[in-house]
């Protein structure tokens, strides 16, 4: 299944009148505020969000998983799916692989396929949170933090192997998320566990190519329910600081306790040049992995507001941070969910670009919280959908990606090609 430029052209022709009717008044309105529309549209168009290889099958919970049909059965099919998304929105031009779920066997063919679909390889992800077949030592009681040197060595070697796979594909970062921790008070010596983790990370760091980064993800609870070795941004930041300049913190939006001020964490990390990447998702109760922007779009906007606050160079912002979706769509078609996620992320970005930065700073300096709030709300309440649509049309993407996806009957075609009972590796 391929989406061609012919499909896009026909769809966009149909959407043209309606789009113009909403876009032109917005241009006038932004002109009136002194906002230049062309550079704004370019910034929105160039912003890319990576798709993880494990998000292309039906999501699920530990209680059940309900297949959707046409799931990608191998890495080539996963790349093809990301290619479909990118053809529709021209905003998903990167794929993030998970080892060992997606080991690239024929590297040359994988690279060629990605290139053909205009995709690059984003951060590679290691997995020491579950035991693999034929694995010598178990991770039941941890990996990089384990009490046994042999288990730690196995986990370190796995991470180094992941770097090697990534290097063959042109990736530039390794993301490490540790499930290590303890379920019961007294089970683990906190100090020793953290020290062992640091030493293991140092061994991995030593093998990192010069132009690579290691991104350290954190999570407050789950799978361990009493303590996690890297529970929060502070611990990740601490480890990244000890490792060196190539180590940074990765912020997964779902990995915070309720009501945590994530935008403030982002501001601090960005100020210290230790913000390495994002995993986007949304949550109502915990690590729900819901569609980004489905629950807390204002928080997402405030996060982007801090990111923009911290940069003078948008290209820098777009290229120096690993942007990725990390969500589980449960009852949705994963491709539809991913289209919605990318849209929500770009919407938040576009709104944050509209913030009257000078006015906001003046209001802050004058200790005028009401005015500061109005300025933020003014940007947040703006309807930026015509800007996003314009950015897509100019990029030769679909005016309405989800609509075209449905009109072309993509899922039905994938079911026809792959069958209704394929199961994608991943979550
Ligand atoms: Mn994550």
Image (cartoon, grey):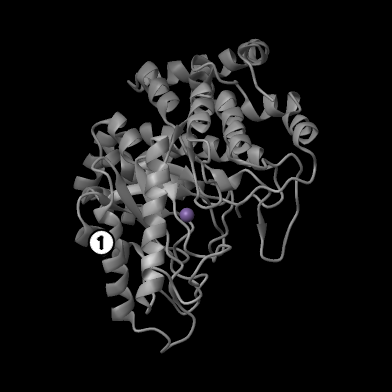
- Residue 53 higher or lower than 196, as above or below: above
Q: Which residue is at the front of the view, 47 or 27?
A: 47
Badge 1 local density, few (<14 within 10 Å), some, or many (20+)? Answer: some
Residue sitting at the far bottom? 186
344, 134: nearer the viewer: 134
Q: Please state, as top left, top right, bottom left or bottom right, where the C terminus lies in the image.
A: bottom right
Q: Which of the two residues, 92 or 150, is positioned nearer the viewer here?
A: 150
Which quadrant does the N terminus fall into? top right
- Going 30% across and 73% down the picture, which residue do you hit? 196
Q: Position of residue 306 (x, y in %)?
A: 32, 45
Q: Position of residue 258 (x, y in %)?
A: 48, 65
* Quadrant in the picture for residue 70: top right
Q: Which residue is pictured at 45% across the width and 46% down the height?
A: 300
Residue at the spot x=41%, y=72% of the render?
A: 151
Where residue 12 sits in the image (x, y, percent)? 62, 14
Q: How many numbered dots are placed on residues in this image?
A: 1
The quadrant holding residue 318 is top left
Between 175 and 389, the one nearer to me in the picture: 175
* Residue at 33% across, 62% down: 233
Residue 239 lies, with reference to residue 26, above or below; the image says below
The answer to whether residue 378 is seen in the rendering is no
In the shown orientation, is residue 21 left or right of residue 357? right
Q: Position of residue 238 (x, y in %)?
A: 25, 64
Residue linked to disc 1 = 202
348 displayed left or right of 420: left
Mark 1: which secondary structure?
helix
Within 8 Å: ligand 1 and the Cβ of disc 1? Answer: no
Name above or below for residue 376 compared with residue 222: above
- Asked whether the viewer can see residue 180, the reply is yes
């Amino acid at each position: 299944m391929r989406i061609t430029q012919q499909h896009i052209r026909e769809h966009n022709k149909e959407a043209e009148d309606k789009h113009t009717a909403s876009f032109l008044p917005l241009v006038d309105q932004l002109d009136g505020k002194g906002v230049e529309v062309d550079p704004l549209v370019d910034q929105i168009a160039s912003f890319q969000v990576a798709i993880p290889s494990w998000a292309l099958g039906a999501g699920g919970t530990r209680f059940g998983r309900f297949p959707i049909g046409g799931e990608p059965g191998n890495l080539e099919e996963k790349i093809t799916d990301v290619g479909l998304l990118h053809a529709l929105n021209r905003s998903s031009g990167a794929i993030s692989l998970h080892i060992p779920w997606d080991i690239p066997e024929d590297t040359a063919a994988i690279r060629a396929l990605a290139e053909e679909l205009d995709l690059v390889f984003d951060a590679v992800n290691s997995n020491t949170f579950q035991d693999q077949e034929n694995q010598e030592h178990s991770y039941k009681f941890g990996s990089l933090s384990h009490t046994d040197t042999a288990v730690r060595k196995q986990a370190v070697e796995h991470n180094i192997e992941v770097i090697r796979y990534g290097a063959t594909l042109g990736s530039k970062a390794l993301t490490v998320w540790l499930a290590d921790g303890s379920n019961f008070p007294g089970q683990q010596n906190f100090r020793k566990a953290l020290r062992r983790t640091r030493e293991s990370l140092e061994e991995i760091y030593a093998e990192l190519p010069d132009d690579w980064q290691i991104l350290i993800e954190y999570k407050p609870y789950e799978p361990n329910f009493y303590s996690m070795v890297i529970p929060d941004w502070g611990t990740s930041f601490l480890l990244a600081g000890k490792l060196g300049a190539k180590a940074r913190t990765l912020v997964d939006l779902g990995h915070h306790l309720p009501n945590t001020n994530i935008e403030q964490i982002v501001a601090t990390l960005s100020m210290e040049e230790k913000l390495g990447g994002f995993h986007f998702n949304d949550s109502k109760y915990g690590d729900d992995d819901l569609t980004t922007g489905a629950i807390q779009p204002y928080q997402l906007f405030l996060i982007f507001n801090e990111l923009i606050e911290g940069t003078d160079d948008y290209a820098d912002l777009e290229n120096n941070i690993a942007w990725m979706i990390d969500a589980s769509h449960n009852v949705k078609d994963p491709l539809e969910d991913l289209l919605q996620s990318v849209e929500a992320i770009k919407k938040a970005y576009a709104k944050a670009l509209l913030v009257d930065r000078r006015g906001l700073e003046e209001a802050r300096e004058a200790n005028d919280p009401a005015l500061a709030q109005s300025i933020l709300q003014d940007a947040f309440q703006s309807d930026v959908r015509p800007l996003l649509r314009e950015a897509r049309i100019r990029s030769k993407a679909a005016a309405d990606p989800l609509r075209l996806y449905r009109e072309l009957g993509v899922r039905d075609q994938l079911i026809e090609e792959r069958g209704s009972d394929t199961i994608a590796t991943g979550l």
